[in-house]
């Protein structure tokens, strides 16, 4: 995906006060600069860490926050109280802060210098209590934030911050993001629908509908040169079956598929879209359901949802941004078929066509095969197995009064056979804690049949995203028990109802 996370900034802001005298404050400034510069160089943190002046007054804090709000590059703040910083100073700033922030509870020196420690040292290194004062005001103001504890050279703490900056970058990317919805929703389907206005208010992205008549002029305008260039790219990237190779009986179908890709790319680029949905029931003007084109656009970082599923499209885009540069792929996904063998129950995930090749275990096969649904020409698609290893499935649903995210931690496994008659991309996984509990919990929570599947991210990333967004988060993992999970669902109903009044 063509996005450099170093183009995003996180601002490193240190709190203090005037009581300590100039010399102590000079030391705080020096230490803060050192920590910020060090964080900026650590590979765990993919964005640019920018040092900001040490804050000693409410006015300074408020000005800095307004500057952060206005900055397109700033995805959030890292806040640290080197000394005691009376927290009422922070109220005005926190009241107007619209960027996510992490409260980094760290200390300049890792170890207590047992022989040398004196009152000057105690005066200067006060984060153990200064950060508690700051923590209180955040809790008192009911502020969502991330708290990370650890020395600033501790790899685990830095990884937590680094992951959070990825989520904050995705959040920034989604503010004002445009999602194109071709042909509205699959008829009669419930879970792919939702309140687009509520999503825009709460999650920041905008979803707008387009007819296929808006797209087809772009598809018709594709030139032979553009189509041929794509065919060459296909030949270099995939194993083409005989029938779609040059001279094969379905070559024209592949050419048409390339034409769709040229057109969709041009439309999405022209409109500045970051994601899109399609609907196989509404394809007037296109001869094939876009399969290959969708797979390849996902690979390049576009969010996608089938059957009009804009929530999953926007979530996929956000998770693509979070995972830039990390190993493992991220894709649109659907729970398709079960293997209910008590000795090892599994879920076969797939979609008719639209699974992203970034999760493939090996070079995909490119073929054209009948779809058996939709009544159009047979569409081109990439066929592959997903790579084995840990993964998560995340689903976002609209409960009418709020959004709920559900994540299932899973382990992808190699299929025990070749599936020679199944011409779609697929991945087989073992859901935690097991299929029975995972599926029961998912269904009780109202999780969709569509999800975002990723091997690049853990559930913690999604939890951070929900914290920033202020939406409900439920995880189904190794420790999930149904009775406790039901309790969490009931508590969520109360909490999110009451939280509106806090
Ligand atoms: Mn579907």
Image (tube, grey):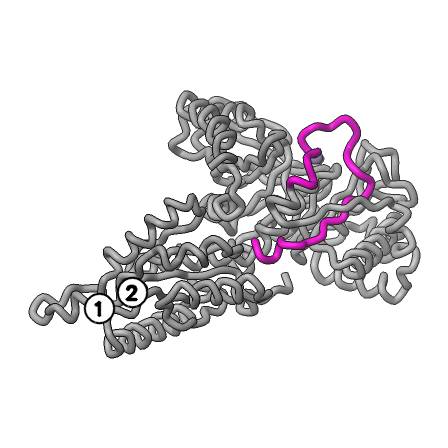
Q: Is residue 57 above or below residue 398?
A: below
Q: Kindly indicate the quadrant of the structure image that contains residue 94.
A: bottom left
- Judge whether residue 180 is colored magenta: yes
Looking at the rendering, the stretch of residues picked out in magenta corresponds to: 171-198
Q: Is residue 496 above or below residue 21?
A: above
Q: Of 416 and 51, which appears nearest the observer?
A: 51
Left/right of residue 126 with respect to residue 488 in the rendered view: left
Q: Kindly indicate the quadrant of the structure image that contains residue 269.
A: bottom right
Left/right of residue 181 with respect to residue 246 in the rendered view: left
Q: Where is residue 307 drawn, in percent x and y? A: 75, 37
Q: Of 221 and 203, which appears nearest the observer?
A: 203
**Circles 1 and 2 in contact, beta carbons < 8 Å:** yes
Question: The N terminus appears in which quarter of the rendering?
Answer: bottom right
Q: Kindly indicate the quadrant of the structure image that contains residue 103.
A: bottom left
Q: How many residues crowd mark 2 within 10 Å: few (<14), some (14–19), many (20+)?
A: many
Mark 1 secondary-structure assignment: helix
- Judge whether residue 342 is colored magenta: no
Q: Where is residue 239 drawn, in percent x and y? A: 71, 54
**How far is the residue under mark 1 from the one under mark 2?**
7 Å
Q: Of 62 and 230, which appears nearest the observer?
A: 62
Mark 2 secondary-structure assignment: loop
Q: Which residue bears the numbered disc 2?
A: 82
The residue positioned 55% from the left and 61% from the top of the image is 69
Q: Which mark is residue 124?
A: 1
Left/right of residue 89 with respect to residue 317 in the rendered view: left
Q: Where is residue 457 drawn, in percent x and y? A: 50, 49
């Amino acid at each position: 995906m063509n996005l450099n996370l170093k183009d995003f900034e996180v601002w490193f802001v240190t709190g203090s006060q005037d009581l300590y005298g100039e010399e102590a404050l000079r030391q705080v400034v020096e230490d803060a600069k050192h920590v910020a510069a060090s964080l900026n160089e650590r590979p765990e943190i993919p964005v640019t860490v920018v040092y900001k002046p040490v804050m000693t007054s409410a006015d300074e804090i408020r000005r800095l926050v307004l500057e952060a709000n206005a900055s397109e590059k700033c995805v959030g703040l890292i806040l640290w109280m080197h000394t005691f910083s009376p927290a009422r100073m922070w109220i005005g700033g926190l009241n107007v802060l619209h960027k996510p922030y992490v409260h980094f509870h760290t200390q300049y020196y890792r170890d207590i210098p047992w022989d040398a420690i004196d009152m000057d040292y105690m005066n200067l290194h006060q984060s153990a209590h200064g950060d508690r004062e700051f923590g209180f005001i955040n809790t008192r103001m009911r502020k969502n934030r991330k708290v990370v504890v650890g020395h600033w050279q501790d790899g685990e703490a830095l990884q937590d911050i680094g992951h959070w900056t990825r989520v904050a970058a995705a959040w920034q990317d989604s503010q004002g993001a445009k999602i194109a919805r071709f042909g509205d929703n699959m008829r009669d389907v419930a879970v792919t629908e939702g309140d687009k206005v509520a999503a825009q208010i709460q999650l920041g992205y905008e979803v707008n509908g387009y007819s296929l008549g808006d797209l087809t002029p772009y598809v018709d305008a594709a030139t032979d040169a553009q189509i041929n260039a794509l065919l060459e790219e296909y030949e270099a990237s995939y194993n083409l079956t005989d029938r779609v190779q040059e001279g094969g009986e379905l070559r024209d179908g592949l050419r048409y598929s390339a034409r769709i890709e040229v057109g969709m790319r041009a439309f999405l680029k022209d409109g500045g879209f970051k994601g899109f949905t399609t609907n196989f029931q509404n394809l007037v003007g296109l001869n094939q359901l876009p399969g290959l084109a969708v797979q390849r656009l996902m690979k390049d970082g576009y969010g996608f949802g089938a059957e009009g599923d804009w929530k999953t499209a926007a979530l996929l885009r956000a998770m693509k941004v979070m995972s830039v540069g990390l190993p493992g792929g991220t894709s649109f996904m659907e729970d398709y078929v079960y293997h209910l063998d008590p000795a090892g129950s599994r879920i076969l995930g797939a979609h008719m066509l639209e699974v992203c090749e970034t999760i493939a275990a090996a070079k995909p096969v490119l073929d054209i095969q009948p779809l058996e649904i939709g009544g159009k020409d047979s569409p081109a698609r990439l066929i592959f197995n997903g790579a084995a290893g840990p993964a998560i499935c995340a689903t976002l649903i609209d409960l009418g009064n709020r959004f709920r995210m559900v994540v299932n931690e899973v382990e992808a496994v190699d299929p025990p056979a070749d599936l020679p008659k199944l011409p779609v991309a697929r991945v087989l996984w073992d859901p935690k804690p097991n299929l029975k509990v995972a599926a029961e919990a998912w269904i009780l929570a109202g999780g969709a049949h569509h999800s975002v599947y990723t091997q690049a991210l853990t559930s913690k990333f999604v939890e951070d995203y929900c914290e920033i967004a202020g939406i409900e988060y439920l995880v189904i993992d190794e420790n999930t028990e149904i009775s406790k999970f039901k309790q969490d669902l009931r508590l969520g109903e109360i909490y999110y109802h009451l939280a509106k009044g806090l």
